[in-house]
Amino acid sequence: KAGVTQTPRYLIKTRGQQVTLSCSPISGHRSVSWYQQTPGQGLQFLFEYFSETQRNKGNFPGRFSGRQFSNSRSEMNVSTLELGDSALYLCASSLPTSGRGNEQFFGPGTRLTVL
Amino acid sequence: QKEVEQDPGPLSVPEGAIVSLNCTYSNSAFQYFMWYRQYSRKGPELLMYTYSSGNKEDGRFTAQVDKSSKYISLFIRDSQPSDSATYLCAMSAYSGGSNYKLTFGKGTLLTVNP
């Protein structure tokens, strides 16, 4: 079974631009979560989507948004990029009804650099 | 107090050593406990998953959960250079419906020297 895929793997943007990242979950997984990972803050939860609806949200500004499509693929958008948005953005998928407490499977991440 | 505390290290050990990685937590609602391994420039991969207090063994890896002390550990026996990675603990609490909130530690960077 194919794992979680994320595109692009690497991205360089300048301040003020916007960016869209894409995630395809494991087949059959309907929940997709997004995380930001930086050396100083570790893994920080952005939001979770389930059946095209945002189910949970972390403490990030409104510049960070996402959506999920009917095939469970998800996109994350960051508008008006700031230098501090440079990070590894990770997508994780899970079977929310697996009874295993939201055990998540991660993609390889998108490395975003903001200049 | 953070919900999950994990010593960031770095931790450096010689090949063959026994490694102990630990996390403490404050939320008694946590029910499921996981360890993820993350190699440099890769996404985290699930290494161990436990539900109840006690030990769970998988090859050279043993996960230990002590709910009374709110303490979890990952032991690596006969450590290998290929075990060099960042290890993240994660734990989840039920939050309604089929919803679980997953919280991660910051990760411990481990280096196993040949």
Image: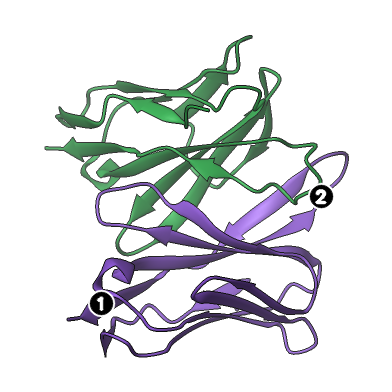
> SS at mark 2?
loop
Q: Looking at numbered disc 1 in the image, what kind of residue is underneath it?
A: Thr
- Measured in 3D between alpha carbons, the distance from the residue under mark 2 to the one under mark 1, in whole angstroms, is 36 Å
In what quadrant of the picture does the C terminus of chain A appear?
Answer: top left
Residue in the picture at 25% in, 39% down? A111
> SS at mark 1?
strand
Q: Determine the colour of chain A.
A: green
In this rendering, does residue A63 appear at all? no
Q: Is residue B9 above or below residue A85?
A: below
Please state which of residues A85 and B74 is positioned toward the viewer in this rendering. Answer: B74
Q: Determine the colour of chain B.
A: purple
In this rendering, does residue B53 appear at all? yes
Give the label, 2 or 1, closer to the camera.
Answer: 1
Whether residue A54 sits left or right of residue B15 in the image: it is: right
Work out whether mark 2 precedes mark 1 in sequence or the reverse, and give the earlier one. Answer: 2
- Callout 1: chain: B
- Dot 2 and dot 1 within a common chain: yes
Q: Looking at numbered disc 2 in the image, what kind of residue is underneath it?
A: Ser
Residue in the picture at 22% in, 23% down? A17
Q: Position of residue A75 (x, y in %)?
A: 46, 20
Which residue is denoted by mark 1 in the rendering? B111
Please state which of residues A63 and A109 is positioned toward the viewer in this rendering. Answer: A109
Residue in the picture at 77% in, 65% down? B51
Residue in the picture at 55% in, 19% down? A67
Q: Residue furthest right?
A: B97
- Callout 2: chain: B
Using a 10 Å C-alpha cutoff, classify the residue at mark 2 as few (fewer than 14 neighbours), some (14 to 19) or many (20 or more): few
Q: Residue furthest top?
A: A70
Which residue is denoted by mark 2 in the rendering? B95
Q: Position of residue B52 (x, y in %)?
A: 80, 71
Q: Is residue B9 above or below residue B57?
A: below
Whether residue B97 sits left or right of residue B66 in the image: it is: right
